[in-house]
Amino acid sequence: MRRARAGAGRVQLGKPSSNLFRFGDRDTGRGVRRLDTSALDGVLEVDPQARTAQVQGMATYETIVAATLPHGLMPLVVPQLKTITLGGAVTGLGVESSSFRNGLPHESVLEMDVLTPAGELLHVTPDGEHADLFAAFPNSYGTLGYAVRLVVELAPVRPFVQLTHHRYTTADAAATAIEELSGSDADFLDGVVFGPGEQYLTTGRFVDAPMPGARISDYTGQEVFYRSLQRRPVDHLTVHDYIWRWDPDWFWCSRAFGVQQPLVRRFWPRRYRRSDVYRRLVALDQRFGASNRVREALGGTAEEMVVQDVEVPVERLAEFLEFFHEQVRISPVWLCPMRLRGERSWPLYPMEPGRLYVNVGFWSSVPERPGDRWAHNRLVEEKVAGLGGHKSLYSTVHYDEDEFWGHYDGAAYRAVKQRYDPDGCAPDLYRKVTGR
Ligand SMILES: Cc1cc2nc3c(=O)[nH]c(=O)nc-3n(C[C@H](O)[C@H](O)[C@H](O)COP(=O)(O)OP(=O)(O)OC[C@H]3O[C@@H](n4cnc5c(N)ncnc54)[C@H](O)[C@@H]3O)c2cc1C
């Protein structure tokens, strides 16, 4: 890695997959040297007694879960997409249906080895000499260095998860229920909004066996998980299939490829029903602008990609959804309650300890507004900031620089950047995520 950096100009991780949704060259594209990470994608050790795993930075959660489940253990928060890596989730944040209880993936990291942009390999712990780097690492997107080895806590599992889908006819009722359910003994909690009058919250509970006579569902075949919320009030999945329930249809985004049509689905090979396959297809389309060219050639309007995850305090959720249904009009929308696990706060993504937030995820496109290619994304940014929330930075970012640093603690970032990357070998966070 050192050799690759020396005199090399810009470098990026040469990973076989990515879950970023920016297709400019800063993260994913041309003109940069790629660091070979193929020897950094494994699980080094699972310690069932200590309930920890020692994992390399570019190991995917698919690899990690495959190593921990045989011990009856899983990471405290497993992001939904199989190729998200531990390093990517810690530096780019992550959230899942255990986040109302277990917080974010970086909160269960016990220690890390980080290769800084200046070329040093540092041992980084919550309270050690490099505690400032530990605190600023989440939401730094590789601009403060790359995590090459991490030790994370694990949690015990049971063989099955029993799911109950609760329906709510107003967003207010759903928000109230989120507050109640987040104080219950459920192991998992997330939800889907199909429209202003139709929202579901799903609670998941570990069980040793399904209820007598209950079926164990399989959504890697002909059925599509998100549709089951509307049809099947109670459901059971193996713990493995629960963890990966959103991956075979990339939540619902596989719809764009026709894969949810029974006929197409039958012939679409099972091994290609994976989020990374669909993402590769979207990346190709974005690179060549193919869909928009076809739309425009047929006399239609180009589309604006609105792919974002934002979080707002639970008491502002209904207000956000009302705005969203009026102004953006994408459906479905994913809801995931989240609360920091500990008392510690994380400067580059400032959430209040103890406060309940709801992550709202939407991943689609809408007709462009004439003269403003990013109008809907800007509206979302403005609304979220006004409601006291934040947005993740894995997709396009449109804030101007001052506003951006106001939301993501520019002063804290600059101090850590100066200490660990004094010569600016890696891009600055704002430039990296905006491409400016
Ligand atoms: C449609 C969609 C839905 C999503 N939904 C969710 C969701 O529900 N829950 C969730 O948790 N996340 C979700 N994500 C976001 C995803 O978790 C983040 O994009 C995450 O950062 C991706 O991690 P990756 O391992 O694929 O990293 P990459 O995409 O390869 O990289 C992401 C960034 O992290 C940096 N990076 C990667 N590895 C390391 C490392 N070891 N050390 C330091 N920096 C590193 C890279 O330089 C890059 O800037 C979603 C993304 C999309 C596109």
Image (spheres, rainbow, N blue to C red):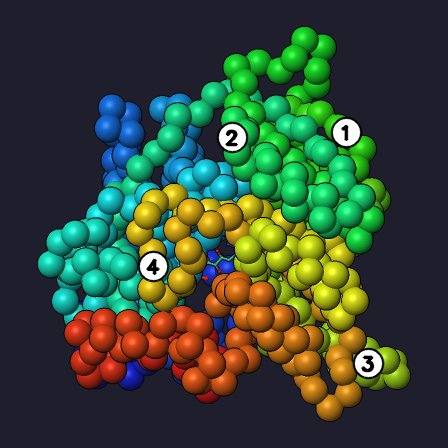
Q: Which residue is mark 4?
A: 346
Give the residue pinned by disc 3: 301
Q: Earlier in the sequence, mark 3 or mark 2?
A: 2
Q: Is residue 60 visible?
A: no
Q: Kindly indicate whether the residue at mark 4 contacts the one at mark 3 (C-beta within 8 angstroms).
A: no
Residue designated by label 2: 187
- SS assignment at label 3: loop
Label 4: few (<14), some (14–19) or many (≥20) C-alpha neighbours in 10 Å? many
- In the rendered image, the quadrant that contains the N terminus is bottom left
Front disc: 1 or 4: 4
Whichever of callouts 2 and 4 sits on the residue coming sooner in the sequence is: 2
Q: What residue type is disc 2 on?
A: Asp
Say what amino acid the circle numbered 3 marks.
Thr
Neighbour tally class for label 2: few under 14, some 14-19, many 20 plus, Cα within 10 Å = some
- Against 48, residue 85 (above or below) is below
Viewer-side label of 2, 1: 2
Q: Earlier in the sequence, mark 2 or mark 1?
A: 2
Across and down, in percent, residue 411 comes to: 30, 77
At 24% from the left and 44% from the top, the residue drawn is 110
